[in-house]
Amino acid sequence: MKRAALLLLLTASAAHAQMYKWKDEKGVTHFTDTPPPATAKKAEVKHYGSGGTGNVELPPELAEIARARPVLLYTTANCAPCDQARQLLLTRGIPYREKTVTSADDQEALRKAGSNGELPTLLVGSARQVGFEPGTWDAALTDAGYPTVKLLPAGYTNPPPAPAAPPPPPSAAEVARAKAEADRAAAAAEKARRERETPKNAPPNFRF
């Protein structure tokens, strides 16, 4: 009985994470798994489940931080530091959006974001980190108030990567050309269907 009770206690402990929510002297909210410093303001203790609920919405406190200081990651293909940066965000449980840089327009968008062209580049609210350096990135995320341990619920996924400079919408001429091609393809398919279904020995001008 004692062993069973101990196992239940250990299981319950593993199923819940105790977090401390507090504000520093600048008013920035932090989430840590260690007690806040003596100078912390409005310190609270939070308990979160480890997952398994299937809920894909962010906890309210994490959603609040993500809205106030969103995380944006710029990457490119065949980039080992980009892979390492992405893994850091995933391991720490940071909700983020990823922008890929593959074209000249993407590079211009990256420049406007404040990068010198080096990838990966990380934006945490208005703060910017150019080039991957784990310690600096961790510090930037912590300073922005993101939790130091993963709090993302089970089933949560970040949006799929998108180009840093989305392609412009098609012009009216391109839309008209695409519609004409679709109409021709539909007419050809209808003609082929009629030819297949018309009896071989049908009289001239036979119609369904």
Image: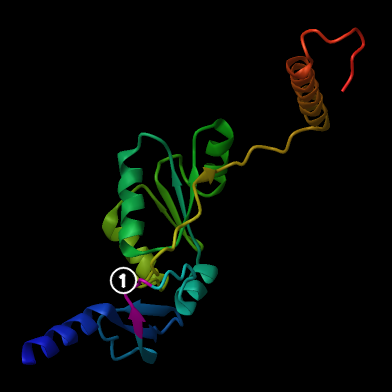
Could you tell whether 100 is left or right of 191 in the image?
left
Q: Where is residue 146 in the image (x, y as percent from the top left)?
A: 39, 71
Q: Per the image, is 49 magenta? A: yes
Q: Where is residue 10 in the image (x, y as percent from the top left)?
A: 16, 83
Within 10 Å of disc 1 (Cα), the crowding (few <14, some 14-19, many 20+) is: some
Q: Which of 59 and 50 is in front in this view?
A: 50
Task: Quarter of the image for the C terminus: give it.
Answer: top right
Q: Is residue 66 depicted above or below 166 in this figure?
A: below
Task: Give SS at disc 1.
Answer: loop
Q: Per the image, is 102 magenta? A: no
User: What range is drawn magenta here?
Assistant: 47-52
Task: Quarter of the image for the N terminus: give it.
Answer: bottom left
Q: Which of 162 and 103 is in front in this view?
A: 162
Residue at the image position 89 percent from the left and 14 percent from the top: 206
How many discs appear?
1
To which residue does mark 1 refer?
148
- Type of residue at label 1? Thr
Residue at the image position 39 percent from the left and 45 percent from the top: 120
Q: Position of residue 107 (x, y in %)?
A: 53, 37
Q: Is residue 147 depicted above or below 85 in this figure?
A: below
Q: Position of residue 2 (x, y in %)?
A: 7, 92
Q: Is residue 160 depicted above or below 168 in this figure?
A: below
Residue at the image position 28 percent from the left and 56 percent from the top: 134
The colour scheme is rainbow
